[in-house]
Amino acid sequence: MKNTFRIFLIIVGFISIIFSTCKLNKNNCENDWDGDITVTGGVKLPYWVSWISYHNFSSIDGIKEISRIWGTINDVPVSDPQSVIRVKTFNSFVDLLTVQWNCDRQSCICDDITIDENEVENLLKIYNAEFFETKNIIVTNITAGVLSMNFRINSINGDGVIDITEALKCTTADAVIDLGISVTFAIEVDNSFISPQNMTVSRKSILGCK
């Protein structure tokens, strides 16, 4: 009986050492992150809005398409050709969320979209008719990876540069970092904001653990 108890204590002690080591060296351990990429400084939009690159918005009043040119990740030029649009009215935002656009391209996959009505309702509480009396939103999407945890939108300057800080999960030996995940978000701007003809994204990456 005593030997069994001693073995039990040894096993418990071994497990405790493993977890203590993990806490001391977070770079080699899993974070408490649940896998959902979040957005701060802006509002994350539903996955189906990420297909804005493939659709024609000319039929929707209150939406302006803005060209997106090369941006940077950690000061390295990259090509990330997703669209940037400016949503000017409440009705146009409703149309955007509910896929009421003129889907006339061969790549259109409108019929495959399953809209979450609760998600739409929650977003319309944030960006309601009163909001659009004084504000607009800039909508774009960027490609994330399995290590991406959070995108913090810091600012948009007068030249149309969207400054973003990306928090990355601490790396693990079996991490697959080249998997593309599209994250779409809205950024609040004043009605008086003059959107340039082209916009870019400046993206800095930091580790989300210390």
Image (spheres, grey):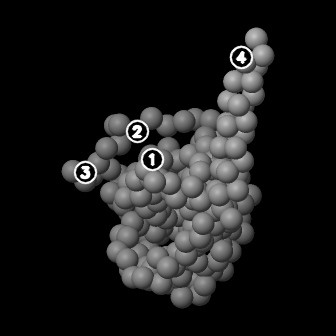
Disc 1 to disc 3, C-alpha distance: 14 Å
- Give neighbour class at mark 3: few <14, some 14-19, many 20+ (Cα, 10 Å): few
Residue 125: x %, y % from top left: 71, 47
| Dot placed on the residue nearer the N-terminal end, 4 or 2 | 4
Q: Residues within 10 Å of mark 2 (few under 14, many from 20)?
A: few
Which SS class for mark 3? loop
Q: CA distance from mark 4 to mark 1?
A: 57 Å
Who comes first in sequence, dot 3 or dot 4?
Answer: 4
Question: Does residue 179 show up?
Answer: yes
Quick one: 28 or 154, which is closer to the camera? Answer: 28
Disc 2 to disc 1: CB gap under 8 Å: yes
The quarter in which the N terminus is drawn is: top right
Please tell me the numbered disc located at residue 113: 2
Cα–Cα gap, marks 2 and 3: 13 Å
Mark 3: which amino acid? Answer: Ser
Amino acid type assigned to the residue bearing label 4 in the image: Thr
- The answer for how far apart the CA atoms under marks 3 and 4 are is 65 Å
Specify the label residue 90 is tagged with: none
Q: What count of labels does the image hold?
A: 4
Q: Is residue 74 left or right of residue 15?
A: left
| Residue marked by disc 3 | 107
List x then y, in percent, for residue 187: 62, 66
Q: Amino acid at mark 2?
A: Ile
